[in-house]
Amino acid sequence: MRISRSIAPAVVALALVLTLPSESAPHARVVADEPDPFGAACRSTVTGSQVIAHCYNPYVAVDRVRLHIECARWWDIDSDSAAVETGPARTVRLTGRCWKEVRSVWFSHQRGEG
């Protein structure tokens, strides 16, 4: 069975990527000049006008996380939560709401003391 000429390069590239040792993968490299990794991973769930968010900090540095909510209606007040310190290997829960619909949700991060 003969492989088509247009598919052959893709098959070879895939085989090479799969056989590379893990230390040569780009995500595994650590460069001495890079700053310490930082920033909690946050996920949010919007149910109607309610927002519930969970942020997990996998790093050593403390992350001060804030939840920001933009409401859909022009008269509905947008909100920003107080900063919550998320220590290493910790998960925090943030909540907020609009009176009506939620337009968007995002997070801000700031290095904490500790």
Image (spheres, helix red, strand yellow):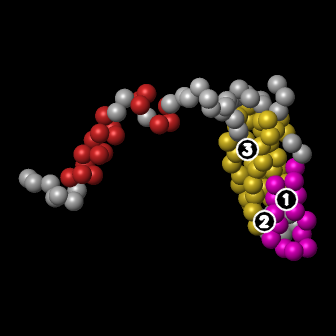
The x, y position of residue 80, in whole percent, is 87, 53
Task: Please report whichever mark, 3 or 2, sits nearer to the chain's N-terminal start.
Answer: 3
Against 61, residue 40 (above or below) is below
The x, y position of residue 51, in whole percent, is 78, 55
Marks 3 and 1, Cα distance to the nearest angstrom?
15 Å
Local secondary structure at mark 1: strand
CB under 8 Å between callouts 3 and 2?
no
The x, y position of residue 55, in whole percent, is 73, 41
Against 90, residue 66 (above or below) is below
Outermost residue toward the front in this view: 33
Q: Is residue 51 magenta?
A: no
Task: Please report whichever mark, 1 or 2, sits nearer to the chain's N-terminal start.
Answer: 1
Marks 1 and 2, Cα distance to the nearest angstrom?
8 Å
Is residue 93 visible in this depiction of the protein?
no
Which stretch did the figure color magenta? 68-81
Residue shown at the point (79%, 35%) measured from the top left: 111
Task: Please report whichever mark, 3 or 1, sits nearer to the chain's N-terminal start.
Answer: 3
Residue 102 numbered mark, or none: 2
Task: Give amino acid for label 3.
Answer: His
Local secondary structure at mark 2: strand
Number of other residues with Cα within 10 Å of mark 3, as a class: few under 14, some 14 to 19, many 20 or more: some
Residue shown at the point (21%, 59%) measured from the top left: 6
Task: Give amino acid for label 1.
Answer: Arg
Q: Which residue is mark 3?
A: 54
